[in-house]
Image (cartoon, rainbow, N blue to C red):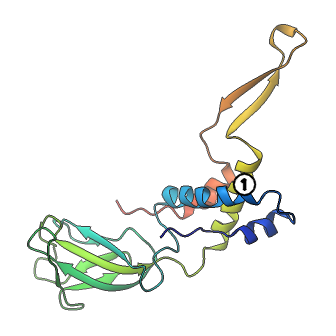
Amino acid sequence: MALNLVTKSEYKTYAGIKSTNYDTEIDSLIPRVSEFVKNYCRRTFVDHMDPGSEKAEVFNGDVDKLILSETPVASVASVETSTDYGQTYTALVKYTDWVNDGQYIMPLNSKSFFDKRIRGYKVTYLAGYDDVPQDVALAIMDLITYYRKNDGAVHNQKSPGGGGSVQLEYIMNTNLPAHIKRVLDLYVSDYT
């Protein structure tokens, strides 16, 4: 289940909105902006922090370490191996077969290498934050405000040919506002 990164109550307090006039719009934007930020940062922040919501990732091996996509890693529940393409898995032993080194699962064998096996390794773990970092929450609330006040285009009024009519020119802008981008770039997960 994908969790929202801010609540309507948090946003309304931040934006100084006391009425319910904008609730439908806010309710629509919060999950969309939350999903956008998760995709942009390549992490979910809070979705895999509670027992029962562990992240399970499958790897093919042929690498010197398994790089976990969610960070920060809180705990690793299991590392398992399969010789039948992921049909069944057998648990590997922590500190005998593997060790967790932050975002990485490192092998502890004579080769220091995970053998090549299609769907041969599965790691189940908890990762993320107990609460969304405050700077990320602020960037999300600014982004919600941005989408509420703009339709994703830059508006420029200009008079074509000096006549009395005004033309509205739309220039599509694919960039995030700089102050939001700066914060989100700090949290982009690099697991390639």
Q: Describe residue 88's horizontal placement relative to residue 79 as left or right.
A: left
What residue is rendered at 44% in x and 73% in y? Answer: 71
Count of numbered labels shown in the rendering: 1
Q: Describe residue 129's horizontal placement relative to residue 102 as left or right.
A: right
Secondary structure beneath disc 1? helix
Residue 109 picture quarter? bottom left
Residue 3 picture quarter? bottom right
What amino acid does circle 1 point to?
Glu
| Image location (x, y in percent) of residue 60 | 18, 65
| Image location (x, y in percent) of residue 51 | 43, 86
What residue is rendered at 88% in x and 9% in y? Answer: 163
What residue is rendered at 85% in x and 19% in y? Answer: 166
- Residue matched to label 1: 25
| 8 or 149: nearer the viewer | 8
| Image location (x, y in percent) of residue 86 | 16, 70
Residue 133 picture quarter? bottom right
Estimate how packed mark 1 is, as few (under 14), some (14 to 19) or many (20 or more) residues with alpha carbons within 10 Å.
few
Quarter of the rendering occupied by the C terminus: bottom left
Residue at the limit of the structure toward the right, as seen here: 164
